[in-house]
Image: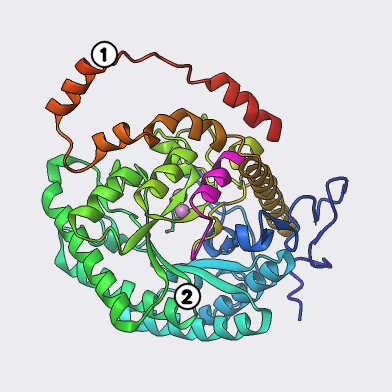
């Protein structure tokens, strides 16, 4: 039954590259097999509940621009009824788009209660409503998460707060969100650092705060095992914003943190393109590093404006960038529990319900093109061939011996002298490889 919010729109269909219909897929063909798997199963698209359904369009200079029938003040005063109305529109959009997954924070889906118990009860009630919608539509939960950053109680962080009562409140909140995520069959549980970081070192004990964060995460992992949650626990790195310095700066920093607390085999990462750029990396750098460290989990597929230097959360629209990203995803063996979440929002002037559909359609098409280009590069060994060649000498026994446990500097030095080793530099062929990539995109 239609909510009427999106007007008279039929489910979005694949029409092929020549289609001029703005409400059709031109490249995303869920059933099409690419590199041995259906596109739908490679990409595992998810819609982020918060940006499309909870965000009113505000920025630091102005408030709400969007008018949605489920926003408070639009007539209805029963906030739980509004939460259900919002869910109706959300699931209608997921079904229209044919996105197999969605993601949410507790605060996106339920109104804040007068105290913790009421907030948790409301979350449970909304989860029941979601469960029936998921049953009805077949749409699944990619990940759940807790919003530990919007409410003023979290202004100085959640797990890293100087006030132990905030730590307790955050722990209780994460427990309730993990319970709901498990109940809804969520495939992952995400922890983005929110306000875990600092504004000034003048009031911050950085060592103590990181100990708190480590203990918190250990408890999250213990709880996951105790309740038998089979999904992955994911940390989402980000270098700054909202705090001046976020502790989960980038993939390398998160890996060091996980190692320090013995969690490197328990926790993976959810990598967001925009956050990679904010950290001074390329997206593919973060993906390749996570894969090399064995902690690649999932992606948030939203870009930033390259000139503005903050997290603008825009839909992806750059196919060559997507091709390099999905190339890394394929090299990592593809997603297991992870997927492609559009943690992306409309620009605040994009007022129409159709804008939401069009934004997702364009993003999905862009990812599909990137995936297809990446799959072709993999099949042709366009990059992996030259790469294997570049490292081929490491297959030789004397080369491998240098990396084995018993290798000693003095033995290597003796061999350099006896064999008169004199390295001959070889071209890195960067421009050749760049030209190769451009053939595929
Ligand atoms: C903010 C983050 C956030 C997480 C979920 O920058 O991207 O949206 O994905 O808490
Ligand atoms: Ni972000
Ligand atoms: Ni994100």
Where 268 sits versus 326, above or below? below
Dot 2 beta carbon under 8 Å from ligand 1: no
Q: Is residue 52 visible?
A: yes
Look at the numbered disc 2 and give the secondary structure of its residue: loop
The residue under label 1 is 420
Point out residue 399 in the picture as x, y percentages from the top left corner: 31, 32
* Viewer-nearest residue: 59 or 365: 365
* CB within 8 Å, label 1 to label 2: no
Point out residue 102 in the picture as x, y percentages from the top left corner: 56, 67
Which quadrant of the structure image shows residue 146?
A: bottom left
Where 249 sits versus 39, above or below? above
Where 356 sits versus 406, above or below? below
Residue 122 lies left or right of residue 37; in this view the side is left
State which region is magenta.
323-337
**The label number, if any, that marks residue 261 in the structure image:** none
Which quadrant of the structure image shows residue 437?
A: top right
The residue under label 2 is 110
**Is 333 in the magenta?**
yes
Residue 29 lies left or right of residue 168; in this view the side is right
What residue is shown at x 51% (from left), y 47% (from top)? 331
In which quadrant of the rendered image does the N terminus lie? bottom right
């Amino acid at each position: 039954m239609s909510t009427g919010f999106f007007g008279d729109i039929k489910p979005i269909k694949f029409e092929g590259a020549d289609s001029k219909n703005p409400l059709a897929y031109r490249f995303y063909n869920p059933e099409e097999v690419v590199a041995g798997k259906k596109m739908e199963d490679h990409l595992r698209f998810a819609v982020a509940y918060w940006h499309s359904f909870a965000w009113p369009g505000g920025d630091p200079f102005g408030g709400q621009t969007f008018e949605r029938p489920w926003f408070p003040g639009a007539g209805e005063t029963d906030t739980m009824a509004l939460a259900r109305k919002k869910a109706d529109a959300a699931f209608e959009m997921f079904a229209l788009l044919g996105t197999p997954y969605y993601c949410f924070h507790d605060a996106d889906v339920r109104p804040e209660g007068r105290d913790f118990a009421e907030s948790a009860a409301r979350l449970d009630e909304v989860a029941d409503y979601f469960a029936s919608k998921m049953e009805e539509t077949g749409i699944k939960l990619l990940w759940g998460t807790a919003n530990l950053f919007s409410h003023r109680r979290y202004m100085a962080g959640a797990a890293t707060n100087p006030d132990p009562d905030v730590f307790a409140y955050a722990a209780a909140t994460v427990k309730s969100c993990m319970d709901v995520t498990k109940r809804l069959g969520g495939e992952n549980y995400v922890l983005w650092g929110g306000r875990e970081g600092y504004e000034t070192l003048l009031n911050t004990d950085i060592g103590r705060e990181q100990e708190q964060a480590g203990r918190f995460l250990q408890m999250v992992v213990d709880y996951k095992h105790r309740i038998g949650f089979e999904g992955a626990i994911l940390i989402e790195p980000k270098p700054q914003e909202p705090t001046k310095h976020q502790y989960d700066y980038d993939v390398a920093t998160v890996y060091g943190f996980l190692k320090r607390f013995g969690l490197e085999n328990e926790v993976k990462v959810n990598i967001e393109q925009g956050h990679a750029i904010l950290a001074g990396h390329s997206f593919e750098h973060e993906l390749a590093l996570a894969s090399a460290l064995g902690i690649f989990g999932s992606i948030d597929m939203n870009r930033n404006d390259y000139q503005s230097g903050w997290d603008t959360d825009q839909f992806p629209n750059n196919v060559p960038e997507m091709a390099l990203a999905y190339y890394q995803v394929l090299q990592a063996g593809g997603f297991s529990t992870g997927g492609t979440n559009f943690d992306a929002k409309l620009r605040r002037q994009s007022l129409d319900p159709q804008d939401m559909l069009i934004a997702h359609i364009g993003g999905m098409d862009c990812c599909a093109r990137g995936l297809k280009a990446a799959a072709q590069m993999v099949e042709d060994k366009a990059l992996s061939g030259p790469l294997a060649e570049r490292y081929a000498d490491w297959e030789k026994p004397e080369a491998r011996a240098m990396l084995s446990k018993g290798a000693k500097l003095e033995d290597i030095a003796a061999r350099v002298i006896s064999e008169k080793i004199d390295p001959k530099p070889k071209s890195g062929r960067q421009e050749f490889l760049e030209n190769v990539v451009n053939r595929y995109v």
